[in-house]
Amino acid sequence: MPHLLIVDDEPSIRELIAEIADEDGYTVAQAGDIRQARIQIERQKPDVVLLDMQLPDGNGIEFWKELELSGTEVVFITGYSSVDSAVQALRFGAVDYLLKPISLRRLKTVLAQLKGMLKQPPALASSDCFAKMIGKSRAMQLLCAHIEKVAPTQATVLLVGESGTGKELAAEAIHLASPRHDKPFLPINCGAISPNLIESELFGHEKGSFTGADKQHKGYFERARGGTLFLDEITEMSMELQVRLLRVLESGCFMRVGTHEEIEADVRVIAATNRNPEQAVASGALREDLYHRLSVFPLELPPLRDRDDDVLLLAEYFLQKLNEENRSAKVFAPEAKQAMKEYSWPGNIRELRNYVYRSYILADDVIKGDFNSFELEAHSAGWGSDILVPVGVPLADANRQLILATLKQCGGVKKVAAEMLGISLKTLYNRLEEYGSNGDIDESSSRTR
């Protein structure tokens, strides 16, 4: 049986937790302060510690840092309504935190999750977790080291990086290196789902809850039960839905659309954005409280231009895959490699992959520098124009001007415009629908390009 140590100066809270933990199959020890906690730890090393952040004889976080108990999971208890202290706790190794007054439902969920973690088989080896993350640069080594640190915890992670930097691969690596690796990993692009359907897609709906709901539907939170849910383009969520997501993260429960019955959310959430999150908060695209709750452990993915020779490793990897699929043996000429190293790759890994694919199709046996120069110059030409937006213009109007100007620059090819803007194709269509515009470009003519 797992052993639980409860460290809190309020006897009523200790007794409540002890009673519930005993019912859930834990052996329990109690301590009212740090001195008593040290005595209990010497008697029996706990598997789990529920630790108050403020104790009569010291700070709970500092005490935990001094202990350095390997193999022991900690959950901090705090009476602060602000999440700042909770964020600090999770960054110091806690798998979760509980706010006072403690929700009994939340407490049972946390204890059950911890018990499941203790029974889980070990996570996959690092080489397996990072198999899809190609690169040996210092930036990638640091990213993988941080992933290894945060993966075993239950902390929410916010991935920040330019479009095409591989945020979904990083999220999957976190999942594979976590105790949840044998459960589902479900990615969802918040900008690729209609705003009218995203609530139903996330939380599910009951039959008859709205027009067209002819049967019960389980949302991503239910389908990912026990696993990891990756929310990409989190800033594309409506404010109302952001409130619901925050409530789920805080309470550990959600409700399907059309019912008031709560369902336990046994899911680890990883979010991502290609925007500066502080700027998104300032512009009103992201709630500040949700941002702090999601960014318990923020990770910034490096752009390809900052990854040294990783561009060549990635290019060779993509080319090898194409050679294997088509039973060919094409190679890069030295001048092609040099051109790839010197290019800035504004579209990052996605742009590089597309370039290798195009060059592979064009080349006979050797991918030469002339293909490189032609393709790179053609792509770069689309980034040279400026638009002037007067100071004081509402942000929504400025966004509209930028989107329509970019679409015009791309000759109406929406896929290319979306890549240049760093948004999904679905998000671009949604914006154009809001503007009541198709970009003033004849779609049939753009297809013939």
Image (spheres, rainbow, N blue to C red):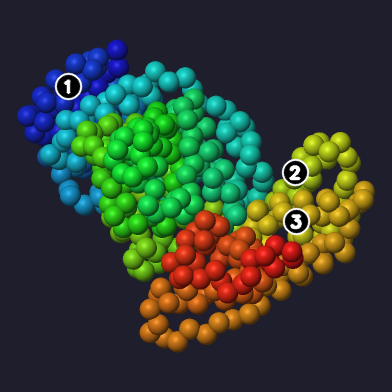
The residue wearing badge 2 is 317
Amino acid carrying label 1: it is Ile
Q: Are marks 3 and 2 in contact (CB under 8 Å)?
A: no
- Nearest the eye: 300 or 249: 249
Task: Give left or right: position of 72 versus 421.
Answer: left
CA gap between label 3 and label 2 equals 13 Å
- Nearest the eye: 288 or 428: 428
Marks 3 and 1, the one that precedes in the sequence: 1
Classify 379 as above or below 260: below
Q: Quadrant of the C terminus?
A: bottom right
Mark 3 is surrounded, within 10 Å at the Cα level, by few (under 14), some (14 to 19) or many (20 or more) other residues, namely many
Location of residue 46 in the rendering, given as x and y in whole percent from the top left corner: 29, 22
Task: Kindly indicate the quadrant of the structure image that contains residue 73.
Answer: top left
Work out which residue is located at the far top of the displayed protein and give it.
1
Task: Kindly indicate the quadrant of the structure image that contains residue 202.
Answer: top left
Q: Which mark is residue 373?
A: none
Task: Kindly indicate the quadrant of the structure image that contains residue 125.
Answer: top right
Q: Which mark is residue 20?
A: 1
Q: Are marks 3 and 1 in contact (CB under 8 Å)?
A: no
Q: Nearer the viewer, mark 3 or mark 1?
A: 3
Mark 1 is surrounded, within 10 Å at the Cα level, by few (under 14), some (14 to 19) or many (20 or more) other residues, namely some
Identify the residue shown where x is 54% and y is 53%: 301
- Nearest the eye: 127 or 59: 127
Identify the residue shown where x is 36% and y is 36%: 214
Q: Is disc 3 placed on a helix, strand or loop? A: helix
Q: Which mark is residue 355?
A: 3
Location of residue 197 in the rendering, given as x and y in whole percent from the top left corner: 39, 48
Amino acid carrying label 2: it is Tyr
Q: Nearer the viewer, mark 3 or mark 2?
A: 3
CA gap between label 3 and label 1 equals 58 Å
Identify the residue shown where x is 50% and y is 77%: 401
